[in-house]
Image (cartoon, coloured by chain):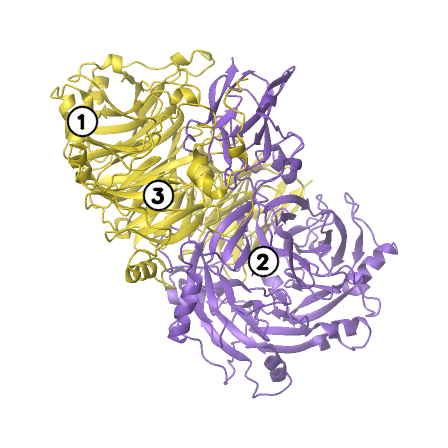
Chain colours: A yellow, B purple
Amino acid sequence: MTQDTLHPSDEQLNPSRRKFLNSAALAGLAGAGLTVGLSACKQEAAAPAAAPAGAAPAPAARAASSADAVHLKPGELDTYYGLWSGGHTGDVRVLGMPSGRELLRIPCFVPDALTGWGITNESKKIMGTKPDGTLRYAVGDTHHVHASYKDGNYDGRYAWVNDKINSRVARIRLDYFICDKITKLPNVQGFHGIFPDKRDPVDPAINYTTRVFCGGEFHVPLPNDGRDLENPEKYRALFSCLDAETMEVRWQVLIDGNCDLVATSFDGKLAASNQYNTENGVHFQDMMSAERDACIFFNIARIEQAIKDGKFTTIPGSNVPVVDGTQAANKDPKTALTATVSVPKNPHGVNASPDGKYFICAGKLSPTATVIELQKVLDWFDGKLEDVDQTIVAEVELGLGPLHTAFDGRGNGYTTLFLDSQVVKWNIDAAIRFHNGDNTAQYVVDRLDVHYQPGHINASQSETMFADGKWLSVGCKFSKDRFLPVGPLHAENEQIIDISGEKMVLVADHPVRPEPHDFIFFRRELITTKQIYSHDDFPHAILNPNDTGVFRDGNKVTVKMTSLAPVFEPKEFKLKRGDEVTIILTNLDRIEDLGHGFAIPDYGINFVVNPQETASVTFVADKPGVFWCYCTHFCHALHLEMRSRMLVEA
Amino acid sequence: MTQDTLHPSDEQLNPSRRKFLNSAALAGLAGAGLTVGLSACKQEAAAPAAAPAGAAPAPAARAASSADAVHLKPGELDTYYGLWSGGHTGDVRVLGMPSGRELLRIPCFVPDALTGWGITNESKKIMGTKPDGTLRYAVGDTHHVHASYKDGNYDGRYAWVNDKINSRVARIRLDYFICDKITKLPNVQGFHGIFPDKRDPVDPAINYTTRVFCGGEFHVPLPNDGRDLENPEKYRALFSCLDAETMEVRWQVLIDGNCDLVATSFDGKLAASNQYNTENGVHFQDMMSAERDACIFFNIARIEQAIKDGKFTTIPGSNVPVVDGTQAANKDPKTALTATVSVPKNPHGVNASPDGKYFICAGKLSPTATVIELQKVLDWFDGKLEDVDQTIVAEVELGLGPLHTAFDGRGNGYTTLFLDSQVVKWNIDAAIRFHNGDNTAQYVVDRLDVHYQPGHINASQSETMFADGKWLSVGCKFSKDRFLPVGPLHAENEQIIDISGEKMVLVADHPVRPEPHDFIFFRRELITTKQIYSHDDFPHAILNPNDTGVFRDGNKVTVKMTSLAPVFEPKEFKLKRGDEVTIILTNLDRIEDLGHGFAIPDYGINFVVNPQETASVTFVADKPGVFWCYCTHFCHALHLEMRSRMLVEA
């Protein structure tokens, strides 16, 4: 038992709230007597000080009009769709923006008792089951949602989200807003960052997403079967590439250190991941021992050529080709598969600017952001640069605890400062000039207090070539006193900020279940949704109430059912105790929003059938008696009377 | 297979949206050629017509100030707490009102991957497990939330919510906002309505809630063990009473027909339930065959005296005393345990007016509301009335599909009209005068279109003696075109209405996951919450990092752990494959909002420990390898580095 760092100080145990804001988020560092390596942020003399909380300092007229824009009148529709990670609820949230209203949660990695996700046979097949038919996983931890691209903008086909706990990727169809495939990454633990490519690195005709990149965060023995438990120097992390259509894992890259967030270039040539644990440390003090960590770049075309050339291995238990992306194996830039650019201490976050020129890495334990120019990275791969760190065109101080950066399409970045509880707006060109010695370059444009401890940040269309600079959303990890108290588990606070002007204007606070992480939001016209299913989607659909009934084959029984408000057919059905029963239910209603639920008391079954949808469940009729199967989804004036009677003979 | 009602008409299959609003919610009635018994609503000549949608017809100034009141500025706190049913998500939602923002979801009946509800040993004990340790139930269907009373107002101790699917009652502690007990009702299926009493019927010193009443909706054989499957005439429903403190079932009442919603009188003497299936029908057309159904009243003091006197039976498998509340056994009013007042066709909803005088039953398939005077019900029990229906003091037409009624404390009711998609404001005294023959009494005060098909409705403080007539919330079952489309599964639409003036003003639309049912909201000062747990709540708390470690007893292993940002202790622990492991984790952080999560990859484990909370999980270490247990709940600048390493030897 190591106890060296764990005698809580008085300061930790009796902090005032304000003191906490300024210091306690660092508790355990100073308190532990460690070298934090966190230099005080010398705010550049020319930069404006932080504005007080709230909208007060902005022009009153703009604050009022911003508020009108986010506070929609009854019946007004939002301008943007937002896709939000659901955090350890394991789903994807769909928001209307700028109102911030949650329109839908899409179950992915975790069962959902509302829709029957994890209960119906159709959803269990997507989620994955053990040999006994129960779900393989019932927890998840989603962090990042990103959507498919075409010509540098979202194309409305798919979105992807990661599950960090069990190293899974889920795909969302953006017509029906449902999860249609889930893939587990082999030999990856703590899968964190995810990003689709934006075009093919080689074929100009493929101007859309065909790959999804996944960063493995925790390093483990390969394979992780009990070997090398006590030899952390043998632990390794992998960077993975999925096929966007088939969702199969195409290839993996063995790297030094770990991956964290992932970003991709608009030209399709590069993917990148920030690395906070280049030390391969196993304790937090080891993970923060180096003064500089890194951002690793992957040369997609070279990796795929290497695989074509057979230059890969496989890890026992998986047949995914694995190429060697370690620094030792990639010393010659002209053949290197990866480039490792140094970035100050434990960076968290890498983001691609919408002009296609830069990747920004924030320092987390350094008060700096590092600006890396993509063309220079390509130059390095071409052997034109002596030192890979010559790709860094700026490294400037922003404030304490910088994490993620969003963009407005006008050359500015907006970076969250976790420790300062601020968003800082800064001009990238000015930062480059300042970095090059121009001390008059005022790269910090504005600062805004947020509430509190912001993590992810994004702006309308920020990660496309069409960033429109209108709205910023900030995910604040602590809400503290911003909402009525509701016991120990606080909501997070998603704040909406108007960035259309020079100064940022805080417009609204929205509480949200902890803890969603990353998100995107984009113009509503980029998606075309379908509100009614097609029977063609369901080979087992029961198209006519005349085809309903009980079909028995020994003790295997199929009950074919239909719903048409306010009637289930059949109105009753009889089973024998011990029967293995499959109920197939088709909703014949074809009116938008006219779904039904189907619950069986005491049998653990409830699911929704949307208009024209078919769903099925399988269970053993192990309890005799009368069971009123009833509609759980309000449908009709006679909703309460909408039932079918299941009779199980003893 | 019965097919008599199920040849969908062209009209059903190709409806226009507007036509649907007006007719399709009745689909299957007219289409089935049944006698609907739904008389057209002759709107009383003097009543105002419905206002157009939106806030337009109200004075512009009031609409604007209403909007300001619900659209809080950043950092502004709400005035009311709202407790909302979570529907078939199986939880309770906590809202701030009038903003309508969701502050928390409290898991009750269904596992919650965010908090670890259904994963930790502590939550599994509350939820209930099978002999093999897995959860007994993983679905739920909550409908009604009500809170404990004292002196006619909420007292901030408890709330209760029902699970219709599995006939369970959950209790919420209103200090920590957590579920602390769940009770399953014996011999009840389809448990729908729930309401606490407001004082004791006999002892004036008990001026607070000590009982919770539960209405059984589906009639089943008693016991439901396979007997009488084909004899629906033997099916029966029960009305149940729980002890508010112990959560044990005190007694049950056998009744004719079914129960639906439940209400209680402010004097503690009566509980009531509307009955939509007095026919004991098993098909929907049977359930709507009678022109009048009923509202049944329970005389609490007499029921409890009967039990003291030994006048009860029990049902095999349960030792809960059951008294006979059927009409045949209760013909003499002076000894009757129940009184059955007739109410038109399939009523849905019964509500007690805040002046303590009336219960309102809405007709659903009749366009009427029935006003029953409580003093007259007591008079009937005293033998002073010849006919129990003389307790009806008004029965007036309101519109099509009346369901639930809220109150403003100024003598007005607000009733949802499901088919008309309206809320109607009506004056109860005027309705009584109209019923008594005064044709000049204009009881309808205002109508407002809502969007669409409203179900439950409630007003600020409406179900207390302190109804304040400020805000109305309406749960609309269909949202259709009110939000950006998100595929087949539409949100419901919770609309907020200003009722402070003569005319109602629609102020905001809020999308919500389907489908929450009932809710209450009340002044925030009625609750005092605690944001930090006490170690005294957890007998197994590990109070000092020095006490952490691995404690082995054969293959049973206890791992004692602590969290203190950003460190878990121990930083690593070793297990043998096949060990039965219990991890006990105490969060030593005591700063408000500083919780941690604890996830084990591939082991199906994730849970939250709030400040000073202890939680535990038990699992078999069946997979060898290195597993990084990590913090899933953002806590600190070194959150990503906050891990403990679990080594499982092969």
Q: Which numbered tag is attached to residue A391?
A: 1
Residue B324 or residue A399, whichever sits in front: A399
The residue that label 3 is drawn on is A422
Q: How many numbered marks does the figure carry?
A: 3
Mark-to-mark CA distance, 1 and 3: 28 Å
Q: How far across and down, in percent of the image, does residue B550 sit? A: 59, 18
To which residue does mark 2 refer? B525
* Residue at the (79%, 70%) spot, across then down: B381
Q: Residue A236: where, in percent of width, then height?
A: 37, 17
Label 1, secondary structure: give it.
Answer: helix
Residue A483 at x, y percent in the picture: 48, 51
A554 left or right of B256 in image: left
The location of residue B490, given as percent across then percent down, is 42, 53
User: What amino acid is at disc 2?
Assistant: Glu
Q: Is residue B86 above or below residue B424?
A: above
Which amino acid is tagged 1?
Thr
Callout 3 amino acid: Gln
Does dot 2 land on a helix, a strand or a loop? helix
Q: Quadrant of the C terminus of chain A?
A: top right
Q: Which chain hosts label 1? A: A
Label 3 to label 2, Cα distance in Å? 32 Å
